[in-house]
Structures are given as C-alpha cells and as structure tokens.
Image: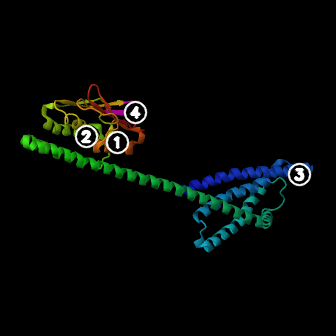
C-alpha cells in the first residue's frame, strides 16, 4: 500500500511538470499566432485556456496510471479488462471537461455559464479525450511492463546471489569436513605410537583428542571464529604433539595485542602447524621450534607459522598436501584475491608459512 501511495504521488508530480510545460508552450503558440494577426489578448488569457486543459489532465493522469497498475491488461481476462477500461474512459470523458470548465471560469473573456461551458467542452472534446486516454493506457502499460521486467531481473539477481552463497557455503563445509578426518587420522597415529612407548601419555593424548573433537563438533557450522578461539584450539592440539615428541618440540605463541578478537576461518592454523611439525621435527632428528605469529597490519591480519628444521625445495612456495590445499581453497572461497597463503624458506633452514587475511571493519 505504501508503494502504491508513493507511486501515485510520483506520477502526479511528473504529470504536473509535463502538462505544465505543455500548457505553457500551447498557450504561447496560440498567443504568437494571434499576435501575428494583430488580434490578440494578454498572454494570461491563453495560459488560462491551455492551463485549464493541461491541469485537468494532470489531475486525471495519476488515477489512470494507478488503475492500470492495479488492473493490468492480461490476455486471459481481456474481455473483463476491456469493460473496466471502457468504463474508466467514459468516466474520464465526463471528469476531464468538468475540471477544465472550472479553470475556464477564470478566463478574462468568459461569458458562458458553467453548465454551458461543461456541455460544450464534453461534446467537442469527447473523441479527443478517448484518444488521449488510449495513449495514456499504452504509456502506463509500458511503464508497468518495464517495472515488472526490472523486478524480475532484481529477483533473478538476488536468487542467483543466494544460490551462489549456498554453493560457497556447501563447498566450505566440504573442505572443512575433509580436514577433520585428516587431522583425526594423524592424531590417532601419534596415539598408536605412544601406546607402545608410553601408555600413560597415550591415555592423555586420547583424552585431549576427545576434547578437540568436542570443540570441532560444537563449531561445526561456524565458518569463522575469533582468533582467540582458534589459538585455544591450537594449544590443545600442540599439547598432543608435545606428548609425542617430548622435549624435542618447542611451541612459541607470539600473538600481538588487539588481534585475538579478529574473526578467522575455523581450523585455519591447525593444518599449518601440523604441516610444520610433519615436515620439520617429524622428518628430522634433533629438536625443533614451531612459532605461531599474529599481527594486524593496516586492514589485514598477518599470520605466520615457522619451523626451523625443514627445508623448502624450489617451486614449492605454493605448498601441497591435503591440509594446505584445503586451506588455500577455503581462503579463496571466503575472501577471493584479498587473502593469500605462501611458503618461504628461512635461513639457514626452516620454512615460514604466511597467511594474509582482510580484516572486516565494522560500518
């Protein structure tokens, strides 16, 4: 109802502007013609004459457009609509001369009575009014058709955007569910090794694993979590790895103030740390340190996972494996080219995995 009211007054405003211009030019044309014949009256006479007709149509036109919008012409109901439009046209042929007659009361040379003026105008302009009504019906039908096409285009765009968002969400869920069994398999492997070497440590690993799985299940539908929550999850995970590697593995967290509340993709850091441990201390004797670094840089969040025991072969800066491949695919789905994941060699040994994420600034 509110849209119809706005549309009605918009049509009225446009009609007033258009018919005012028509009235001015029509009155000026009549005035110029009589002036050339040296038999003319003041311009006000001509403007009242043309303005009365123009403003009569300016009042009638919005109702024609409103009627056409409420009762659009359809082929399946053509006869009923035709009768309705004929009745409206008949009403206009009575109302428009009535409004015009009111305007003519102010003509400087008006000598006829109101009734005579109305009767004269209705008979004289009957055919012309019908023709103009048909033109306005066609114009209103064209406007309604354009409005419907625009509405359909917008609905289609909105529908496509919703479907695209659903597809992206489904793909993100798929990528995440691929990470979970991969993470579970590797952790259970660590527990199996410990069962033979240290049953008590194996029991602790399984207990921590159950806690991790509970967190994963609780956040199953969350595409993003605060960095604080991701760090807490990671702390549980590295405790499991430290049970396996004992004093050989050192974990350092270097999280800058003000970054812990920034949203990041869930399960973002775990595959990066797992990759650093697997290719670092997992393949080399001796000890290693894994460092997790987070800092905000302007409108981006810089995340780094470093280990100092592995090496990076030439051409492997993009990274491979299930964990890194899924992480890169998730970043691309969520952020497009605004996010990146790269591997860089450290000197003399080691690898740094760098993730750059956009920080969403609240409006």
Which segment is the magenta one?
Answer: 297-306
Q: Quadrant of residue 91?
A: bottom right
Give the label on residue 299, or none: 4
Q: Nearer the viewer, residue 101 or 247?
A: 247
Mark 4 or mark 1, which has the lower sequence index? Answer: 4
Mark 3 or mark 4, which has the lower sequence index? Answer: 3
Magenta residues: mostly which secondary structure? Answer: strand
The reply to whether discs 4 and 1 touch (Cβ–Cβ < 8 Å) is no
Judged by depth in the image, the label closer to the viewer, 2 or 4, is 2
Mark 2 or mark 1, which has the lower sequence index? Answer: 2
Alpha carbon separation for disc pair 2 and 4: 24 Å
Image coordinates of residue 140 in percent, x first then y, are 64, 60
**Circle 4 sits in a helix, a strand or a loop, which is it?**
loop
Mark 2 or mark 3, which has the lower sequence index? Answer: 3
Residue located beneath label 3 in the image: 34
Image coordinates of residue 234 in percent, x first then y, are 23, 38
Residue located beneath label 2 in the image: 270
Dot 4: few (<14), some (14–19), or many (≥20) neighbours within 10 Å? few
Dot 3: few (<14), some (14–19), or many (≥20) neighbours within 10 Å? few
- For residue 150, above or below residue 89: above
Q: Quadrant of residue 272?
A: top left
**Circle 3 sits in a helix, a strand or a loop, which is it?**
helix
């Amino acid at each position: 109802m509110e849209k119809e009211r706005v549309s009605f007054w918009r049509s009225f405003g446009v009609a007033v502007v258009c018919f005012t211009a028509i009235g001015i030019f029509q009155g000026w044309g009549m005035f110029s013609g009589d002036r050339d014949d040296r038999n003319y009256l003041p311009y006000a006479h001509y403007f009242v004459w043309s303005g009365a007709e123009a403003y009569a149509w300016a009042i009638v036109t919005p109702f024609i457009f409103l009627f056409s919008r409420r009762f659009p012409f359809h082929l399946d109901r053509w006869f009923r609509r035709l009768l309705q439009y004929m009745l409206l046209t008949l009403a206009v042929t009575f109302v428009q001369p009535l409004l015009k007659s009111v305007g003519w009361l102010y003509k400087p040379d008006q000598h006829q009575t109101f009734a005579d003026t109305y009767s004269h105008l209705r008979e004289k302009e009957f055919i012309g009014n019908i023709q103009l009504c048909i033109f306005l019906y066609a114009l209103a039908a064209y406007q309604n058709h354009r409005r419907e096409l625009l509405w359909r285009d917008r609905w289609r765009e909105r529908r496509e955007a919703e479907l695209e968002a659903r597809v992206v969400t489904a793909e993100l869920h798929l990528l995440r569910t691929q990470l979970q069994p991969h993470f579970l398999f590797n952790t259970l492997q660590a527990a199996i090794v410990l069962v033979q070497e240290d049953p008590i440590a194996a029991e602790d690993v399984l207990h921590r694993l159950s806690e991790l799985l509970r967190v994963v299940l609780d956040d199953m539908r969350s595409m993003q979590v605060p960095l604080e929550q991701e760090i807490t999850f990671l702390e549980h995970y590295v405790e499991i790895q430290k049970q396996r590697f004992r004093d050989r593995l050192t974990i350092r967290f270097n999280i800058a103030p003000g970054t812990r509340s920034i949203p990041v993709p869930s399960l973002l850091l775990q595959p990066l740390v797992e990759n650093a441990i697997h290719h670092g201390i997992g393949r080399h004797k001796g000890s290693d340190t894994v460092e997790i670094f987070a800092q905000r840089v302007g409108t981006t969040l810089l995340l780094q996972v470093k280990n100092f025991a592995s090496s990076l072969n030439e051409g492997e800066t993009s990274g491979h494996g299930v964990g890194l491949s899924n992480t890169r695919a998730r970043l691309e789905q969520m952020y497009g080219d605004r996010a990146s994941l790269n591997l860089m060699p450290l000197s003399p040994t080691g690898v740094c995995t760098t993730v750059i994420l956009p920080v969403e600034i609240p409006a």
